[in-house]
Amino acid sequence: MVEKTVEIPAAQFEEMLRYPLTNQDFLKENLKTMYQDGNGVYHCLLVTGRDRADGLLVESDGSCYARYAAYVPQARALRYPVLAELEQKLTDAVDFIIQDGTSHTSEGNWILDFDELEEQTGLAVYDRPFLQELIGDLLCSRPEVADLSIEDGHFDVTYYLDFCQGYEKKEKPQQTLRKLIAQGIPADTYLVHPRDVGFIPAGRLEASDLESGMLEEWSDILDAEIIELGSGGYGQEFLLEGIPVNRLRAFDDFLSQYAPRMSALPTEIKM
């Protein structure tokens, strides 16, 4: 139980934290304030540093130093219990808004009326713009919240989709060389690589080649994801993910031995 609060200079408070067994004049002056009563309750001195939020609960047990002490990060709340109570209500309200929104929305947006918030948490914010803005600031500090507006008696919250339980991430269909060939790959399509394997004429392949079985040993290349597709000097060019250079060169050698469907393809450039 806090019987009295004593504020000391910040430097002195810091020194007391470092060396709690050092005698302090203000403790000597307040010896009768600190004691343990017959019910086992400790009556303490709350020591704070000027312009600091933290503090020490001290029961010196008749000594002039902090014989028994407990560090309190938010000591000022002990001086005003109503602030601690309000802080808890605000925390509960914000937690409820986040939980309610992320558990219900599948698209990221969720609206919560002030009346519903009061019914669920007991915190009334209607006609209390300060509390509304305070809750808004607390919400915006949460990693789940992307955007927020407060209007017409409700909180309109936009959540990041990764936090929304009902959101089903739609995977972008993976594009592969196999799919391109099956769909009818243009003849002027070339496989390239940042390390300059040249222009590998993937456009020589046709859908019938997939059915013939002649490409079975190249399934790693056929099923690798296309990570870049664009226009180049000779036509379409694309990159595959995770295929080593030596494997691509071997695939190029294979295609050079395979009868091309076009005789007018440009000569592959080997750099």
Image: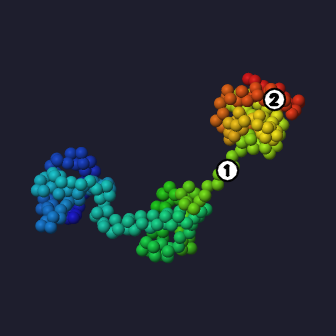
Number of marks present in the image shown: 2
Would you name the residue on which mark 2 appears? Answer: 258
Identify the element where label 1 is drawn.
loop
What secondary structure is marked by label 2? loop
The C terminus, quarter of image: top right
* Residue 234 visible somewhere in the drawing: yes
Q: Amino acid at mark 2?
A: Tyr
Q: Is residue 237 left or right of residue 50?
A: right
Residue at (68% x, 31% y) in the render: 194
Q: Looking at this rendering, what residue extends furthest in the top direction?
A: 271
> Is label 2 or label 1 in front?
2
Residue 161, how many percent across, how many down?
Answer: 58, 57
Residue 240: % across, % down: 69, 37
Distance Cα–Cα, label 2 vs label 1: 33 Å
Relative to 202, say whether 88 is above or below. Answer: below
Residue 69 picture quarter: bottom left
Residue 172, numbered label:
1
Query: Residue 262: x, y in percent?
Result: 87, 32
Q: Earlier in the sequence, mark 2 or mark 1?
A: 1
Location of residue 168 (image quadrant): bottom right
Closer-to-camera residue (8/71): 71
Which residue is at 57% across, 64% downward? 105
Q: Quadrant of residue 264?
A: top right
**Residue appearing at x 15%, y 64% in the figure:** 40
Going by the image, does 172 lie left or right of 45? right
Please tell me how crowded label 1 is: few (under 14), some (14-19), or many (20+) other residues with Cα within 10 Å: few
Left or right: residue 175 versus residue 14 is right
Residue 194 vs 41, above or below: the answer is: above
